[in-house]
Image (cartoon, rainbow, N blue to C red):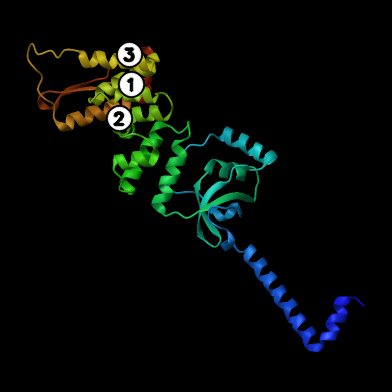
Amino acid sequence: MSAEKRNALGRGLSALLNDSENVNQNQNNNNNKANVSSSPEVNSLGSVNEIKLTEIEVNPFQPRTDFDQQALAELADSIKLQGLIQPITVRRLNAHSYQLISGERRFRASKLAGLTHIPVYIRSANDQQMLEMALIENIQRENLNAIEVALSFQRMIEECNLKQEELGDRVSKNRSTVTNYLRLLKLPPAIQASIRDGELTMGHAKALITIEDPTKQIYIHQHIIQQGLSVRKTEELVRDMQRAPVKKEGKQPEPISFQVQKIQDDLASKFSTRVKLKIGGQGRGTIEIPFLSESDLSRILEIMDW
């Protein structure tokens, strides 16, 4: 008989009962700890935790809308081999529900890789912080296009009640940079689409926003696309147009009405070229749509479903 058992017997029945209660108490404590460990509430803020992918919903404030499917597939293949090295960041909605703050590309690739759980950082954030963090994380990506950045800046100003200086502080940009991005949203839709699709760079856009006349913007935009103008050539073309003297000799044309100007602007946006609308007496008139080449004419005729 061991010394421990002899000592226990020597202490009598009460000592054994006390030992039994201590063992039961220790088991209960251990069970409680196990239950706490399995509870999502143990996931502390800022720590890395494993969470089911099915418990995570995407961020509704995500400013990024386009994801390269081939790049996602390549990342998914890497995750299959190496696992997800960099955790995503989420906020807790309730015990078994989380919302993505940043890392949607890794989240999507993990799904493609067939993962059931994913490592995450858990943060506490309200809707305004969610929008700010999602924006800041995304604008640091080189492949986020300028229109997406501009739209995100606009949302922060409108939804978070920020001034441009405050927005600049949040995203580490000076006010002039923020202003230039926001001015992109005032360009005609055809030009915004070209920026979004990568046909125009931010340099081209900065040159175009110095022109106030939308029809001139469309005209230069068409030259850039058709002739493949560099940023430098675009800047030279803009300067030449702005230096062009205004002819004052002869009879000046009558100022056009707001309605006619609106029609001209809409047509210019549709055809991506300058459009001139002339209306004479009795409502008669002409529409002039200039073209730069035979291919440009074919493009315009295709838009007209000719």
Q: Amino acid at mark 1?
A: His
Q: Which residue is mark 2?
A: 188
Residue 216 shown left or right of residue 3 in the figure: left
Q: Which residue is mark 3?
A: 292
Q: Kindly report the distance in space between the C-alpha atoms of the residues bearing marks 1 and 2.
A: 10 Å
Residue 183 shown left or right of residue 43 in the figure: left
Mark 2: give few (<14), some (14-19) or many (20+) Cα within 10 Å. some
* Front-most of residues 258 and 209: 209
Helix or strand or loop: what does disc 3 sit on? loop
Q: Residue at x 41, y 47 (%)?
A: 131
* Front-most of residues 153 and 27: 27
The numbered dot on residue 221 is: 1
Mark 3: give few (<14), some (14-19) or many (20+) Cα within 10 Å. few
Q: Kindly report the distance in space between the C-alpha atoms of the residues bearing marks 2 and 3.
A: 20 Å
Quarter that holds the C terminus: top left
Report if residue 272 is visible in the image. no
Which of the 4 image quadrants contains residue 72?
top right
Q: How far across and how far down the image is residue 14, in percent?
A: 77, 88
Which tag, 3 or 1, sits closer to the chain's start? 1
Report if residue 209 is visible in the image. yes
Helix or strand or loop: what does disc 2 sit on? loop
Q: Kindly report the distance in space between the C-alpha atoms of the residues bearing marks 3 and 1.
A: 12 Å
In the displayed orientation, state which residue is furthest to the bottom: 13
Q: Amino acid at mark 2?
A: Pro
Which tag, 2 or 3, sits closer to the chain's start? 2
Q: Are marks 1 and 2 in contact (CB under 8 Å)?
A: yes
Can you tell which of label 3 and label 1 is closer to the viewer? 1
Q: How far across and how far down the image is residue 111, in percent?
A: 61, 45
Q: Residue at x 47, y 41 (%)?
A: 137
